[in-house]
Amino acid sequence: MRILGIDPGSLVTGYGVLEKNGADILHVDSGVIAPSPRKLFSARLHEIYTNLGILLKKFRPDEVAIEEVFFAQNVRSALKLGEARGVALLAIENQGLPMFEYSAREVKQAITGYGQADKQQVQKMIQRLLKLPEPSAVDASDALAIAFCHFQSRKMKSYDRAS
Amino acid sequence: MRILGIDPGSLVTGYGVLEKNGADILHVDSGVIAPSPRKLFSARLHEIYTNLGILLKKFRPDEVAIEEVFFAQNVRSALKLGEARGVALLAIENQGLPMFEYSAREVKQAITGYGQADKQQVQKMIQRLLKLPEPSAVDASDALAIAFCHFQSRKMKSYDRAS
């Protein structure tokens, strides 16, 4: 079972690919899509969409987990974030993959046990949980956390079914 | 010169195609893309994106005008609107078309002479300006108004250059 986690953003979109092997959750790949801010915004959307399409074809995940957003600084930033998130959802939809959404709070809770954890705490725990030699870039780490959260959530669901 | 106007929305995306022939601005086509609300949101985004792609190929506009958004009821609705707007921007970017953005206030000002005009006033003026036998659906009318506003704006720009 392979999961792609996505943390969409209007400036930087993080991604992380995890694979479950028996009881182990292994890091396959992670990184960021960060189009030049000097490009037109529509060209940046095109870059996010195209690169996610390439990643989906390269890593062929079974499922995709993406951050669900409830808050933004203001309407303007919510719109820009929505635009980036929209093209990410479209890239996933194109591949017909099952998609699951988790709030930042659920992800932080799943990774650190604390729903208000900051990005650095998540980064450290992700490094430890996945036995990475170095901490990932913050946006890549967030995407790995979303994918990890989805594995945890699947585990709970199957536990529920078994009990 | 042919213009496609787009009024993106998370539920209904309006479109309108206008063509300038001498001094006349003629209605070519208009309508709405309204995916079933029972579909998954990502499938609705896919429908907006695919249908806009078909319209762009069918009508081959020279330029596209789209509503610029500054306000939304709340962050949640701004995000959903952004998602729909993001896939619309992507469809335009795919065709490499020049794109122009106008605020609702600029559009209303251009059509009715009053920046606070309501949708019904815009609808009536668009019907009169384009000599339509019946008023268009509100979202189609808004899209026609955006395209019309762009023609007006181009006229002012060329006037500026000539003076």
Image: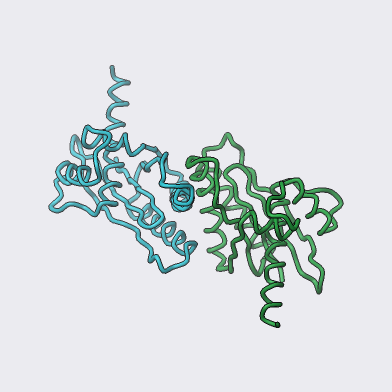
Chain colours: A green, B cyan
Q: Position of residue A67 (x, y in %)?
A: 61, 56
Quarter of the image containing the C terminus of chain B?
A: top left
Q: Position of residue A41 (x, y in %)?
A: 52, 40
**In the image, what residue occupies the spot 63% across and 64% down?**
A64
Q: Residue furthest bottom?
A: A162
Q: Residue furthest top?
A: B163
**In the image, what residue occupies the spot 80% across and 50% down?**
A124
Looking at the picture, tell me which residue is in the foreground, A109 or B61.
A109
Q: Position of residue B44 (x, y in %)?
A: 44, 62
Res. A60 image quadrant:
bottom right
Quarter of the image containing the N terminus of chain B?
A: top left
Res. A35 image quadrant:
top right
Res. B20 image quadrant:
top left
Relative to B160, say whether B10 is above or below.
below
Looking at the picture, tell me which residue is in the foreground, B48 or A130.
A130
**In the image, what residue occupies the spot 42% across and 39% down?**
B70
